[in-house]
Amino acid sequence: MKLKTMSISMTLALGLALTSMAGAENVNTAATHSVQAAQNTSAQDNRLVLLGTQGGPRVGVKRANPANLLVINGKKFVVDAGYGVSVQMVKAGYRLQDLDYVFITHMHSDHTLEYGNLFYNAWVTGGLKKPVQVYGPTGMKNMTEAYFKSNEIDINTRMADEDRADPRKLIAVHEIQQLNPVFKQDGIKVTAIKSIHPPFDETYSFKFEFNGKTVVFSGDSAYNEEMVKFAKGADYLVHEVQYEDGIRRLAKKLAGDSQSAEQQYQHFKGSHTNTDELGRLAQAAGVKNLVLTHYVPGDDPLISDKMWEEGVKQFYTGNVVIGKDLTSIDL
C-alpha cells in the first residue's frame, strides 16, 4: 500500500521550519502548539502525540520520560504517565482538565511516576467534571489510594477553602482482568497482549482500533513474536527501541557493587528490543508506519537519529518516524 507524504513541522519560539518526507501522514514536532490549542478540544480531533520519549527512570534535558497522548474523536487517552507528562500535555496544546482516560502498561516508575500528579493537576485546574477512567495492572488501585492519602491534607484543605469537588469521586480505576477487550465504547476498542519485560509478569501492549484505524503501543518489551500477530497491518506501531552499542556503554556506566556491567547488559537484552529486532518485527507484521520511542539509551550523544533509523531500516521497508518529544501525528 502506498503511504501518503509526511510533513514534519518544527514550531520554535523564533520561527517555523517545514520538511517533507515520504511515508506517514502529517507529523508535527513542536515546542508549543498555541495556534492549534483551540482545535485540540474538537470532537473531530484524531491525533497521536509523543509526550515523552526517554527510556528508563533517569531524568534528562533532551527527552521527557515515557508518555503518549492518543486523541480519538476528541477524547484524550494518555498511555503511560512518566515524569513530566502534565507539562508535556500542556505544551502539546491540550487542557489537563479534558483528560478522559489513562492506560498504564506496567508498574515501572518511569511509566507511573506522574500518574497521580497528572490526575491531580487535571482536578486542581477546576475544570474536571467527569471521572477519569484508568486501566492498568494489579496495583493501580493501591497506588491511587496511596496517592490520595499522601495528599490528604492539601486535598481536604482545597475542598473546604476553595469549594472544590472531592477528587476521589472523579476517578475510576480498573485493574485489567481480560485482554480482549480491555475497553470498548463509542466505536473505540482497546485490546492487549502481555509483553516480555522481566522481572514483571503483568506488563501490557495495547491496541487501539477506531474509525478504521489501528494504533499499537508496545510498552516495554523484548522481541515478542506475539506482537507480529497483534500489530498485523497496523497503521502505526509505537514501539520502544534500544541500540546495541549504546546499551553496552550504559551497562558499564550503571555497573556497581550489586550488578556487574555484564549483568546490566543482559537485563537490557532480556527486557527491550534492539533496532534490528524491531525492524524484523515491523516487517513481519506489515505495519504501515513504525514510530520509535522509549529510546534506550535516550541521551547517548554518540547515537544519531540516522543511526536509529538505519538500524531499523536494515529489515523494515516501511516508513519510520524518529519520535521526539511532542512529535504530533494526524490520524
Image (cartoon, helix red, strand yellow):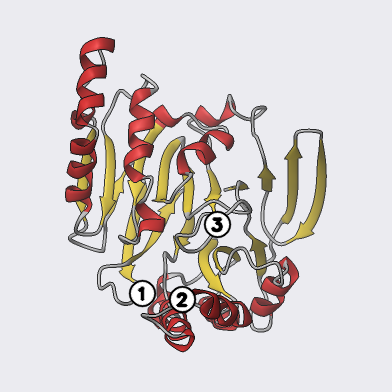
Q: Nearer the viewer, residue 39 or 78?
A: 78
Left or right: 324 in relation to 69 = right
Q: Secondary structure at mark 2?
A: loop
Quadrant hosting residue 290: bottom right
Relative to 137, say whether 232 is above or below.
below
What distance separates the C-alpha of mark 2 from that of mark 1?
Answer: 7 Å
Q: Position of residue 168 (x, y in %)?
A: 19, 31
Q: Nearer the viewer, residue 107 or 9?
A: 107
Circle 3 residues within 10 Å: few <14, some 14–19, many ≥20: many
Number of marks present in the image shown: 3
Q: Position of residue 8 (x, y in %)?
A: 74, 50
- Residue topped by disc 2: 272
Q: Residue at x 48, y 58 (%)?
A: 215
**CB within 8 Å, label 3 to label 1:** no
- Residue topped by disc 3: 53
Quadrant hosting residue 218: bottom left
User: Which kind of residue does numbered mark 2 sit on?
Assistant: His
Relative to 194, say whether 42 is above or below.
above
Q: Residue at x 62, y 58 (%)?
A: 323
- Residue topped by disc 1: 197
**Considering only order in the chain, which callout, 2 or 3, is on the residue closer to the N terminus?**
3
Q: Position of residue 7 (x, y in %)?
A: 75, 50
What distance separates the C-alpha of mark 3 from that of mark 2?
Answer: 14 Å
User: Which kind of residue does numbered mark 3 sit on?
Assistant: Thr
